[in-house]
Amino acid sequence: MSDYFTTDELAKFLRIKPRKVYDLISKGNIPHSRVMGKLLFSKIEISNWISGTEKSVSEMKNIPNVLLGSHDPLLELAVKHSKSGIAMSFDGSIQGIDRFKLNQGIASGLHIYDHNLKNWNVSLIKSQLKAKQVVLMEWATRQRGLIFKSTNNNKKKKSFKDFKGKILVIRQPGSGADTYLRYLLKNEDLSYDDYINSDLAYSENDAVSLILSDQADVSFGLKSEANKFDLEFIPIVTERFDLIVYRKYWFENPFQALLNFSKTKDFLKLASSFEGYNIDNLGKIHFNS
């Protein structure tokens, strides 16, 4: 049995004429999707629309075409190369979800690990967005670890303990990097107080720039960014970076343009230059509300 009504099936279900369905669509009063030119109506969304438990369609239509959340360098380039028209506003995994709940963007990137349940991102989405019509899609897995300059003084450094008292790159509170780093430091009986804190870095590029400019000694960053600038890298964790997307906007042209680009040879060539990345499962659904 299909999860969607056709126009005629919905009209019969609502006991109205098909032309009334088209009238509701034209006024933005009923949830719908257009796939390959065909109108479809999610049975779950229709049920929520009838009961009044979902946001109004007009409110959903006002969501800006923006990608929120955590920064991923490959995703940033893919958005630009895909010509999707999606704007980007990266401000960390947790803040991205908070803004996503306020309908400030159609999708949000995240990489938050639940150390109790041992999963990436799913626990957070289930607790924060279980009432929303959303899909959690894998983008890539990435190697993250220590990044620092290769100097005589740094040759024997292997862990954060070895950098105690040095300048540590600080990521914004609520970012995936900040969350996991606090966990690592706690396990080694350390905290940010054991380091000189750098200025906040709001992206992976910013974090590496602080190392390159000698404004910091060590960062908890991506292997891909370390390799670009011949910096030392010691792997610590392979994380999964996902995108949470409103189901309605999954089928719209901007997000479809991004997905279609990710299937091209140009994208594969682009991704192959990112050391420590694995995109074999790009597009895999890990949660569907």
Image (spheres, helix red, strand yellow):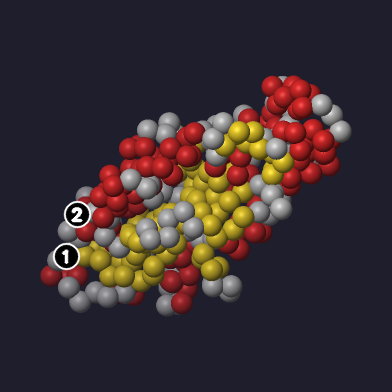
Which x, y percent locates residue 155? Answer: 17, 73
Q: Residue at x 58, y 74 (%)?
A: 116
Seen in the picture, residue 214 relative to 113 is either above or below; the reply is: above
Quadrant position of residue 114: bottom right
Residue 205 makes an appearance in the image: no
The three-letter amino acid code for the residue at tag 2 is: Phe
Residue furthest left in the image: 152
Residue 74 makes an appearance in the image: yes
> Quick check: 26 left or right of 276?
right
- Mark 2–mark 1 Cα distance, whole angstroms, equals 11 Å
> Quick check: 167 left or right of 22?
left
> Quick check: 97 left or right of 179?
right
Which x, y percent locates residue 43? Answer: 74, 45
In what element is the residue under mark 1? loop
- Specify the label residue 229 is tagged with: 2
Residue marked by disc 1: 150
In what element is the residue under mark 2? loop
Q: Which of marks 2 and 1 is nearer the N terminus?
A: 1
Between 220 and 35, which is closer to the camera in this rendering?
A: 35
Q: Residue at x 58, y 62 (%)?
A: 122
Q: Which residue is drawn at 54% across and 50% down?
A: 244
Q: Which residue is drawn at 19% across and 70% down?
A: 154
Nearer to us: label 2 or label 1: 2
Seen in the picture, residue 32 relative to 278 is either above or below; the reply is: above
Which x, y percent locates residue 180? Answer: 46, 65
Residue furthest right in the image: 15
Which x, y percent locates residue 222? Answer: 32, 59
Seen in the picture, residue 181 relative to 283 is either above or below; the reply is: below
Q: How many labels does the image show?
A: 2
> Quick check: 121 left or right of 171?
right
Q: In which quarter of the image is the C terminus?
A: bottom right
